[in-house]
Image: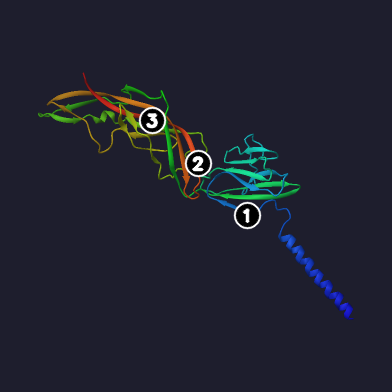
């Protein structure tokens, strides 16, 4: 009887140990191909050439997909994004690059900023020896961005000056009184504008700018060793116009004699130039930096001329 009870106790102990072992195996999956810290990566910035160790020599990227919709993301050739051998592959939209180098146990990733207000969520599927695992990323927009370095170079030969009456009005000043009067002529230039135009093909070149803070300082315009323009312009894609005649600004006047009509017209001397620019921009949340480059065209009213004509 005692022997029977002993066998029963041993069996129960063996069963408990076996169940405990099974539970541990279940809680710690054997298909883990990388450190568990990479299962849920939270970011608010981009990075270049960060590597994730893969626990296998022979591995591949099986897919990259949107974590919300499940859509398979495409590479530059318009095919589902995969990485089966040494080399690199980049998303069609350009914000993600994956690379497998001679260091076979490393997946190297470059991820550009997410400038959208909506988090970017995506998954990278890893396959090795029949085992599968998944990297998960959630990337948010940085809380703010700032230019920390500017390089602006005027393109040689792009500068030109010319005089035109295009957009300039003709007016008649009439003094019907018995005394001479100073009469304003500035109105003939009311449709003259400063013009600034930015263009760039870089990823997110204009998307990082905070909507309420688009004005930036650019290089002054020197002419005969004198500064003819210095100031801020809106950093946005396409043209921006600023009136030459400012409200509340200085006015030009002409003395008109009693009972006299004078016809007025004008011309404007303009300067145009084109520059190459590169801005180094800092993500104020992550501290990471990135560059955007493009062209900046500028048209500046330099010198007005007013004529009296019959």
Tell me which corner region of the image, top left, top right, bottom left or bottom right, holds residue 95: top right
Q: In the image, residue 301 lies at what x, y percent? A: 32, 28
Residue 77's tag is none
Q: Position of residue 307 (x, y in %)?
A: 23, 22
User: Mark 1 Cα within 10 Å, few/some/many (few <14, many 20+)?
Assistant: few
User: If you read the primary sequence from the N terminus, does the residue marked by circle 3 or circle 1 appear first?
Assistant: 1
**Between marks 3 and 2, how big is the CA–CA gap?**
25 Å
The answer to which of 188 and 106 lies nearer the viewer is: 106
SS at mark 1? helix
Q: Compared to 205, does 31 lie above or below?
A: below
Question: Mark 3 highlights which residue?
Answer: 298
200 horizontally vs 159: left or right: right
Q: Dividing the picture into quarters, in which one does residue 233 lie? A: top left
Task: Please tell me which residue is depicted at 43% across the width and 42% down the height of the picture.
Answer: 147
Q: Nearer the viewer, mark 3 or mark 2?
A: 2
Residue beneath disc 1:
37
Q: CA distance from mark 3 to mark 1?
A: 50 Å
User: Which residue position is annotated with label 2?
Assistant: 290
């Amino acid at each position: 009887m005692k022997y029977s009870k002993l066998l029963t106790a041993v069996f129960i102990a063996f069963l408990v140990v076996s169940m405990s072992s099974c539970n541990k195996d279940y809680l710690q999956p054997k298909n883990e191909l990388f450190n568990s810290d990479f299962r849920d990566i939270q970011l608010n910035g981009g990075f270049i050439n960060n590597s994730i160790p893969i626990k296998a020599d022979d591995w591949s990227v099986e897919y990259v997909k949107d974590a919300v919709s499940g859509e398979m993301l495409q590479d530059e050739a318009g095919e589902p994004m995969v990485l089966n051998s040494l080399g690199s592959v980049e998303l069609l939209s350009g914000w993600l690059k994956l690379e497998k180098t001679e260091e076979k146990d490393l997946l190297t990733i470059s991820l550009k900023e997410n400038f959208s207000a909506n988090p970017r969520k995506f998954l990278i599927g890893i396959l090795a020896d029949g085992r599968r695992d998944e990297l998960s990323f959630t990337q948010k927009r940085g809380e703010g961005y700032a230019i920390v370095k500017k390089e602006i170079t005027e393109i040689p030969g792009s500068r030109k000056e010319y005089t035109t009456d295009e957009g300039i009005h003709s007016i008649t000043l009439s003094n019907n009184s018995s005394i001479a009067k100073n009469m304003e002529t500035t109105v003939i230039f009311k449709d003259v504008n400063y013009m600034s135009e930015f263009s760039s093909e870089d990823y997110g070149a204009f998307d990082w700018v905070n909507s309420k803070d688009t004005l930036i300082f650019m290089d002054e315009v020197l002419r005969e060793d004198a500064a003819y323009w210095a100031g801020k312009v809106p950093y946005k894609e396409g043209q921006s116009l600023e009136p030459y005649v400012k409200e509340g600004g200085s006015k030009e006047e002409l003395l008109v004699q009693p009972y006299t009509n004078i016809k007025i017209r004008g011309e404007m001397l303009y300067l145009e130039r084109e520059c190459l620019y590169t801005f180094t921009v800092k993500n104020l949340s992550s501290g990471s930096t990135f560059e955007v480059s493009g062209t900046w065209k500028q048209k500046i009213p330099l010198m007005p001329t007013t004529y009296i004509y019959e």
